[in-house]
Image (cartoon, rainbow, N blue to C red):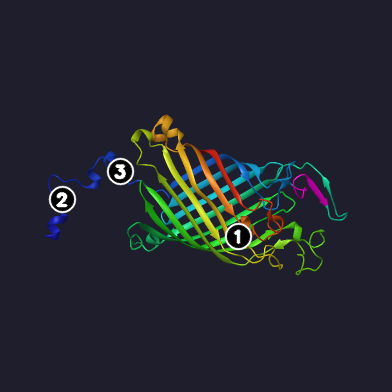
Amino acid sequence: MLAAAAVPGPNSATAADLPAKAIKKAPDIPFFLVIDDRVSFSWMPKGTDPGMFSIRPDGSINGTTAKQVYSFTHFDLWAYGSNFFTISMFKSDHNDPANPCTNAGVVFNPGLGVATGANCAGATEIYGLFRSTLGWNEIFETKAFAVGPLHNVSFEVGMDASTENTYLAPAKRDVVAGLQFGFDLPYKGYFNVSPLLYWEYYNRNAFTQCGGGFAGAVPGVSCLTDGERSFNPTWAVETNYYMDLGFLPETMQFWSISGRAGWYGQKGSENNPLPGTKTAVEFNSEPIRLTFDASKAAWGAKYSHFVDVWVAYRYWQNKFGIDHKASAVCNVAPGVSNNSCTEETVYGGITVKF
């Protein structure tokens, strides 16, 4: 029977007998299943930078600063996971001044012990963030980690880096590692929760440098020889979500909502390894962003999310881990806040896909 089955019948054809056009090679599967690159511009009317404030003519404290934000984001999906990268430039107004100003409108001369007036340009900050995941369903070739709304569990790693041309001259470097739990939301949405280990191993502060005129004179006790702080490893939880507003009538399905939130544990003193005021749990969030898909509305579904216009609410308490209640950075006197360590603002922007 096997031999007979192997013999072609009178009407069958072997591959060699078929015309060349009839044989189609299966298309190669691309390495990246999704690649999404975007640029954004946004305006933030009430940003903050801890310790940066001015006094208004009526004596009230202005701890907020308007910021222009220019961003590039990249997202890709491949056979075993995903990669996300974003880099942003924040351009501040004069209430958050660049070096050599030590605060808004002021240059302090440590050698003379006096401050003189100055009109420094607004600071420029560059901030980059990277996150990468490896899905357990993909690694182990199983569906065991897709149960109910849970669609996957993944390993997650990442890092952050920043620099700013203020007198403080921060240069943050941190790494994260842990897990991500991915859940499905209605209308092709998702919700991700990531418990992580967080280590900010480097971040410069010129005010802590020995010989700078602001810190003490004993290296390792009241000053740092090079101003380079290193914080303790701690915990973090990062979340993000996205969902189309698919319950709207079809003629209005141009809207979506998204958001994120991150909690970062205490990491030592604010000038670690120097002793001093302890850091606090940092809460950095954009709980809601409402996006209008302008390109889909104008040119149809083929061009969905090529041009997005959005508005968002941002709330950041204990910015950079500095305790807004206890730190001298955040208060001009005990219990009198300079309003610079909690950021709360509504802001908006436009995003273009390319």
- Which residue occupies the foreground of this view, 281 or 241? 281
Kind of element beneath mark 3? loop
Tag shown at residue 174: 1
Q: Is residue 238 above or below residue 296?
A: below
Q: Position of residue 237 (x, y in %)?
A: 51, 60
Kind of element beneath mark 1? strand
Query: What separation in Å lies between label 1 and label 2 (alpha carbons)?
Result: 66 Å
Query: What separation in Å lies between label 1 and label 3 (alpha carbons)?
Result: 50 Å
Residue 106 on the magenta span: yes
What type is the residue that disc 1 sits on? Asp
The picture quadrant where one finds residue 23 is top left
Give the magenta-colored segment's residue range. 99-108
Q: Residue at x 69, y 41 (%)?
A: 93
Nearer mark to the viewer, of 1 and 3? 1
What type is the residue that disc 2 sits on? Pro
Q: Main secondary structure of the magenta part?
A: loop
Which mark sits nearer the N-terminus, 3 or 2? 2
Q: Residues within 10 Å of mark 3 (few under 14, many from 20)?
A: few
Q: Residue at x 57, y 40 (%)?
A: 42
Quadrant of the image containing the N terminus: bottom left
Q: Position of residue 41 (x, y in %)?
A: 57, 39
Q: Which residue in the rendered view is the most extreme toward the right?
A: 112
Residue 39 on the magenta span: no
Tag shown at residue 8: 2
Nearer mark to the viewer, of 3 and 2? 3
The residue to which callout 3 is attached is 24
Please state if 72 lies on the left or on the right of 3 as rendered. right
What type is the residue that disc 3 sits on? Lys
Q: Position of residue 113 (x, y in %)?
A: 86, 55
Which mark sits nearer the N-terminus, 1 or 3? 3
